């Protein structure tokens, strides 16, 4: 190591550290990959919201779909609700997981704001939530046709998230489903 | 009267602290289970409020995980089984002491590697210093020594 190089060593170290820290500015530490990616949706037996039917894994799997975790106590869920309705109008299958909520409040919410969901699982105790690794609402899971979790989005699904992240994956899974 | 008032005030403050600390209490069938509950709830990280363990956090998810932990301990699960259960759902992230391997290798080895690097730099510095100390003239060649001497002579003449 020449003396000249040694002279510049602190500068190099500084530059390296600056790059690492600069990158750190744009990382979101609350964004964790789900432990469930590429693993099947856990099986469950929970009541349907607004009915006395018992739902299981088979009721929400079979085609590429979104599973949206929501609750009436969750403020961001109210923000994303209109966009979910738009997606449902476009024909995207969305299943709801009503997470740690009261059935009557949830039903009122759907009556007032509209219902984008094909079905709603009433997870009053949050047991399926724990099996899914949910740590707060809203969360949205992308399921493939075999009921395998392919992606999880934590936070509000809006036009930007759908168009840049979820829709490409959704389309990919859809075409993959047709091919074989 | 004044003393009484301040005593009452102090008691109230102490009591309110106690009320806050008691989020929920669990009954354990044995003290050993309770000790393991304490230990595990301090080792498990709250997924929502990431810089707290589930013992400290009051987030709904931390409450749920404490409840689960209690249930599983009472059901006779081993520490390993409980940690596996949590990691399967929330990822390695949920442990404050993650398993060694895969993506956590760097995390575990970084302190050792940094220590070794520091020792290396220290040894190199000490050795080069020792070399200079052993032989002070060795740092200058004969020509350099001569040039230095002329410079010194010149500055002496100038002053």
Image (tube, rainbow, N blue to C red):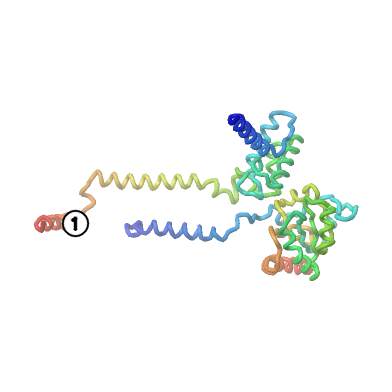
Q: Residue furthest front?
A: B1
Q: Tell me what residue is drawn at x 66 percent, y 55 percent.
A: A33
The answer to which of A17 and B102 lies nearer the viewer is: A17
Secondary structure under badge 1? Answer: helix
Picture coordinates of residue B10, whole percent (x, y): 61, 33
Q: Residue furthest right?
A: A52
Image quarter of residue A93: bottom right
Whether residue A157 is situated above or below residue B18 in the rendered picture? below
Whether residue B56 is situated above or below residue B154 in the rendered picture? above
Q: Is residue A180 visible?
A: no
- The mark total stands at 1
Picture coordinates of residue B49, whole percent (x, y): 64, 49
Badge 1: few (under 14), some or many (20 or more) residues near its Cα, within 10 Å? Answer: few
Q: Residue furthest left?
A: B157
Q: Tell me what residue is drawn at x 48 percent, y 47 percent.
A: B113
Q: Chain of mark 1?
A: B
Picture coordinates of residue A19, whole percent (x, y): 49, 60
Picture coordinates of residue A48, whole percent (x, y): 86, 54
Q: Is residue A152 visible?
A: yes
Please identify the quadrant where the C terminus of chain B is shown: bottom left
Is residue A84 rendered to the left or right of residue B115? right
Please identify the quadrant where the N terminus of chain B is shown: top right
Is residue A23 rendered to the left or right of residue B123? right
Q: What residue sits right under mark 1 in the picture?
A: B144
């Amino acid at each position: 190591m020449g003396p000249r190089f040694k002279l510049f060593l602190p500068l190099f170290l500084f530059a390296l550290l600056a790059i690492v820290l600069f990158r750190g500015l744009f990382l979101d530490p609350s964004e964790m990959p789900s432990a469930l990616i590429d693993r099947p949706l856990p099986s469950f037996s929970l009541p349907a919201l607004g009915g006395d039917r018992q739902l299981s894994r088979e009721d929400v799997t079979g085609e590429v779909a979104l599973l949206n975790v929501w609750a009436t106590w969750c403020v961001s869920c109210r923000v994303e609700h209109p966009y979910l309705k738009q997606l449902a109008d476009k024909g995207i299958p969305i299943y709801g997981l009503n997470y740690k909520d009261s059935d009557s409040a949830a039903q009122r919410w759907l009556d007032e704001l509209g219902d984008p969901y094909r079905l709603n699982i009433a997870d009053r105790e949050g047991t399926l939530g724990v099996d899914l690794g949910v740590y707060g609402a809203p969360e949205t899971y992308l399921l493939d046709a075999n009921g395998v979790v392919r992606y999880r989005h934590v936070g509000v699904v809006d036009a930007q998230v759908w168009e840049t992240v979820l829709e490409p994956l959704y389309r990919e899974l859809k075409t993959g489903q047709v091919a074989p | 009267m004044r003393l009484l008032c301040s005593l009452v005030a102090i008691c109230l403050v102490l009591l309110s602290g106690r009320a806050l600390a008691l989020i929920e209490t669990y009954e354990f069938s044995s003290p050993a289970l309770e000790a393991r509950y304490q230990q595990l709830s301090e080792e498990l990280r709250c997924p929502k409020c990431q810089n707290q363990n589930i013992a400290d956090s009051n987030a709904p998810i931390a409450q749920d995980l404490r409840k689960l932990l209690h249930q599983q301990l009472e059901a006779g699960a081993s520490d390993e089984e409980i940690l596996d259960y949590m990691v399967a759902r929330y990822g390695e992230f949920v442990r404050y002491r993650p398993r060694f391997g895969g993506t956590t290798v760097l995390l575990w080895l970084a302190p050792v590697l940094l220590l070794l690097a520091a020792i290396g730099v220290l040894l190199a510095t000490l050795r080069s210093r020792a070399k200079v100390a052993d032989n002070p003239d060795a740092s200058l060649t004969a020509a350099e020594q001569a040039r230095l001497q002329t410079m010194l002579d010149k500055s002496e003449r100038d002053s």
